[in-house]
Amino acid sequence: MTTKQFKKILHTISYDRHNRVRVFIELQPDEQSSILFRLNRHVQYQLVIELSDEQLVAILEHLDPDEATDILQLLNNKRQKAIVSNLNEHLQKSVAILLHFDPETAAGLMNVDYIQVELDDTIGSVAKQVKIHEKRTGKLPTILVVKEGKLVGQLPGHELGFAHAGDVVNRYLKKIKSIPHNARYKQVLAIFRQYPHNKVVVVGERKQILGVIYTDDILKLIQGHEAASLYDFAGVSDEESIYDSIPRKFRFRYKWLIINLGTAFLAAFTVGLFDATISKHVLLAVYMPIVAGMGGNAATQTLAVMVRGLSQSDLGFSTIFNTLKNEIASGIINGIINGIIVTLIVYVFNDNLLVGLVLGFAMVVNLFIAGLFGTLVPVAMKKLGKDPASSATIFITTATDVFGFLAFLGLATMILG
């Protein structure tokens, strides 16, 4: 299959829900496995529930154990057991282990593509085990070294090509990081950041080896979490994808758009309170978008920092207070700088110092509000048990719009009359 053909088939299966199963079934099992992992999770589910157990077994036989486990987790327990029982012995054993664990713990992320050797094994005996594993799985394994059943290090694969067959493993032993099997996603990510190696060993309660997590496994998980955070940030459900139909997209988005419409009316109502002032000083209307835009952008910057901080740790009261103080101070300083700039621009281009001063002061107030609400809203959502990124922009932007317009138009009413 050429690259062009592959892309065409991938597009058809992704978007043509009426013909996707027919097109998919016509492919060879190895082609099906390649296509399947390029699809959105929702489309994967729609496909696998339509396939027979025999068809799924043929596809899974072409996947690594961790990839096969990802697909099986789309199915209910009864069907999982039926399919696993028909897999080849090696895949069946590996998948049965992986299905036992929470998919977002270290054990749920691990790969079982490894072999265990003893400290006093010879290089020659290890090479034979590697060949057996490769012949059975088609993959070169990670070589983990144990003593009395517990991990002590690894034997780098390249040593097999340079060492003498009679040398013992202990001579070439290298350290390797390990992590408990029940460690959560954040802990796994932290250890990869702290120790940027290409793999980490997952160990059980008795320090026995359960599997290996590779950098590729972490990258896939990070991409999934970043996509979910991006969806939340925009007020879009993480179950929605680019492949969804119009009715499905409507169901996922309408509630947040209605909430946004309500908050927009609140901002509009605030502006309406100053009709007389705007009518008398039309120049105010020209600069109103600057007030709204700067406040919204500043608040989004603060929100992004807070969401990142909340995702990495639980912030205590003292930390939140210091963060709030710093964000407010930063907002005021940025407000003063930008306020001076806009005051000069209005004075130079419109020859109106008073409007410039009003706009400049409103800028300071609005960036103060951006720091305040940009910090407190995500913290409040976290305390309420909600995702701190979930559509917080709607509420924060409303605050900056309403208070920004109040400051700008209220000051204009008092100063300009």
Image (spheres, rainbow, N blue to C red):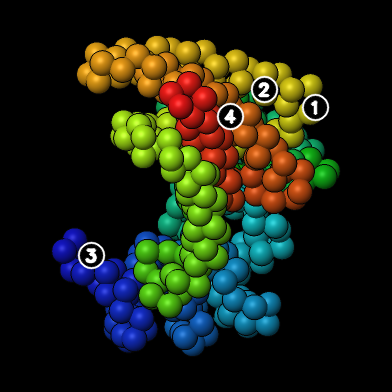
Check disc 3 and report its element: helix, strand or loop: helix
Check disc 2 and report its element: helix, strand or loop: helix
Q: Is residue 324 visible?
A: yes
Identity, as a three-letter code, of the amino acid under mark 2: Thr
**What distance separates the C-alpha of mark 3 from that of mark 1?**
51 Å
**What distance separates the C-alpha of mark 3 from that of mark 2?**
47 Å
Identity, as a three-letter code, of the amino acid under mark 3: Lys
**Dot 2, crowdedness within 10 Å: few (<14), some or many (≥20)?**
some
Instruction: Name the residue located 43 percent from the left edge and 31 percent from the top edge.
Output: 291
Which quarter of the figure has residue 23? bottom left
Q: Nearer the viewer, residue 199 or 259?
A: 259
Query: Do tag 1 and tag 4 residues touch (Cβ < 8 Å)?
Result: no
Image location (x, y in percent) of residue 172: 56, 24
- Residue beneath disc 1: 317
- Residue beneath disc 4: 369
Image location (x, y in percent) of residue 330: 55, 17
- Residue beneath disc 2: 323
Which label lies toward us, 3 or 4? 4
**What distance separates the C-alpha of mark 1 from that of mark 2?**
10 Å
Query: Do tag 3 and tag 2 residues touch (Cβ < 8 Å)?
Result: no
Which label lies toward us, 4 or 2? 4
Image location (x, y in percent) of residue 351: 26, 16
**Dot 1, crowdedness within 10 Å: few (<14), some or many (≥20)?**
few
- Residue beneath disc 3: 7
Identity, as a three-letter code, of the amino acid under mark 4: Ile
Which label lies toward us, 1 or 4? 4
Compared with residue 11, is residue 322 higher up or lower down, i.e. above or below?
above
Query: Do tag 1 and tag 2 residues touch (Cβ < 8 Å)?
Result: no
Identity, as a three-letter code, of the amino acid under mark 1: Phe
